[in-house]
Amino acid sequence: MRLQRITNGLTCTTAAAALALLLTACGPSQPAGQGSAEPGTGSPSASGSQPALETSAPSSSSSSSSVAPSSPSATPLSEAPQATAAAAQLCKAGALKATTDATGGGAAGSVYMELILTNTGQASCQLKGFAGVSLTSGPNGQPIGAPAQRETSVPVGDVLLAPGKSGTAVLRYTQAGNYPDCVKAPAAGFRVYPPEDTASLFVARPSDACSNASIELLSIGAFQAR
């Protein structure tokens, strides 16, 4: 009987020890791997840093895309005068005053002068190209001889005249006495047609004209800003 109790006791003790060993080996091992890591330390911190980099990249790209459209919206300063000139109406005789300045002198029987058109209106206007110029017997008289021929050595450009401003063109008058076959007629001055206008202005300047239209006493250049 005593041997049987000892055997049973050994069996229970061995079983209890084995159970305790099993609980010690298996129980703490699983929580230890997952519960020991704290937020912001170890491998979870490294894995969390990657999303931060990914979100920052789109922000820089959206920032650059917001700046890009601003560039085309800016209008170059060099285009502003062109746009203003294009919007202005052509200068008309009713809002212009015509004068001449002969201080340029002369050569070989010719007199060079400036034909000056001044804007007397309330709005800006545009001069472009050549005036029509003829010698005439008076403010209401008919043209005498050939009209002025165009001198194209100076290129045509847009001349924007603000109120009170002027544009000029070189006007050359050749003395009628240079032509033996000239049939002379007295002229009281010049009849001036602004570019692309059918109304005219008169500039008083007495001189001799040639009534025969085959003789060209006048030439006119393109208008320039004064």
Image: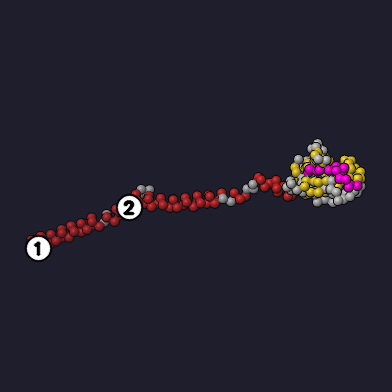
Span highlighted in magenta in the image: 169-183
Q: Nearer the viewer, residue 153 or 180?
A: 180
Q: Is residue 99 left or right of residue 66?
A: right
- Front residue of 77 and 193: 193
Q: Quadrant of residue 96?
A: top right
Looking at the image, can residue 144 be seen? Answer: no
Question: Outermost residue, top direction?
Answer: 103
Residue positioned 88% across, 47% down in the render: 181
Q: Position of residue 27 (x, y in %)?
A: 26, 56
Per the image, label 2 sits on a secondary structure element best described as helix
Q: Position of residue 15 (x, y in %)?
A: 17, 60
Q: Residue type at mark 2? A: Gly
Distance Cα–Cα, label 2 vs label 1: 47 Å
| Residue 35 circle label | 2
- Mark 1, residue position: 4
In the rendered image, the quadrant that contains the C terminus is top right
- Judged from the image, the secondary structure of the residue bearing numbered disc 1 is helix
Q: Say which residue appears at 73% left-offset and 50% top-offset.
A: 86
Q: Residues within 10 Å of mark 1 (few under 14, many from 20)?
A: few
Locate residue 194, reporting x and y percent: 82, 48
